[in-house]
Image: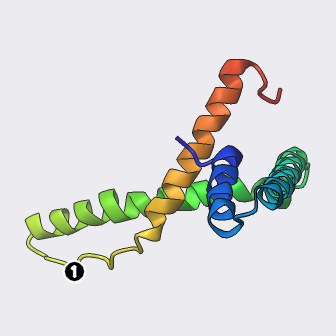
């Protein structure tokens, strides 16, 4: 399950509960925080939509490019590299394994797969872009 705006609001409200003891001030702070985060979320959604609909490939294509780079890096790290090491070893010409990629690659991949899941959800609900 992805971390969404409601989760961000809930986490922020826990912080408000700890630092603002006055019930009225807490209620006002919660209302301002909720409004601010919802405004930010709406703005980010509008930005994402504008980027996706842009006719310029440089603007609209950066997310797919990151996906291809991530997929290629994972393929090299976990398929191509190990198979090459094995094949050269079997052929009698052992080679050194390629250097390991940073673990942050997994975080990028899972984040992008989460967005892919949301896109699938949009398609199922019939709100996918034509």
- The location of residue 95, given as percent across then percent down, is 19, 78
**2 left or right of 25?**
left
Which is nearer the eye, 59 or 87? 59
- Residue at coordinates 48% horizontally, 61% vertically from top-left? 107
Q: Residues within 10 Å of mark 1 (few under 14, many from 20)?
A: few
Image quadrant occupied by the C terminus? top right
**Quarter of image, res 17:** bottom right
- The location of residue 9, given as percent across then percent down, is 70, 52
How many labels sit on residues?
1
- The location of residue 126, given as percent across then percent down, is 75, 19
**15 left or right of 128?**
left
- Residue at coordinates 63% horizontally, 60% vertically from top-left? 66
Q: Is residue 120 above or below residue 63?
A: above
Residue that mark 1 sits on: 96
Which is nearer the eye, 83 or 40? 40
Q: Is residue 51 above or below residue 1?
A: below
Which is nearer the eye, 7 or 89? 7
**Residue 3 visible:** yes
- Residue at coordinates 71% horizontally, 48% vertically from top-left? 5
- Secondary element at tag 1: loop
**119 left or right of 47?**
left
Q: How is this picture coloured?
A: rainbow
**Residue 65 visible:** no
Which is nearer the eye, 7 or 121? 7
């Amino acid at each position: 399950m992805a971390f969404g705006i409601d989760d961000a609001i809930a986490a922020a409200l826990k912080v408000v509960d700890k630092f603002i003891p006055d019930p009225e001030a807490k209620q006002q702070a919660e209302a301002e925080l909720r409004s601010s985060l919802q405004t930010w979320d709406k703005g980010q959604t509008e930005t994402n939509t504008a980027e996706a609909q842009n006719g310029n490939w440089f603007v609209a294509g950066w997310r797919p490019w990151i996906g291809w780079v991530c997929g290629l890096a994972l393929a090299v790290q976990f398929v191509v590299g190990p198979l090459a090491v094995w094949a050269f070893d079997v052929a009698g010409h052992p080679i050194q394994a390629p250097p390991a990629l940073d673990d942050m690659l997994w975080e990028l991949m899972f984040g992008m797969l989460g967005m892919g899941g949301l896109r699938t959800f949009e398609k199922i609900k019939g709100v996918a872009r034509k």
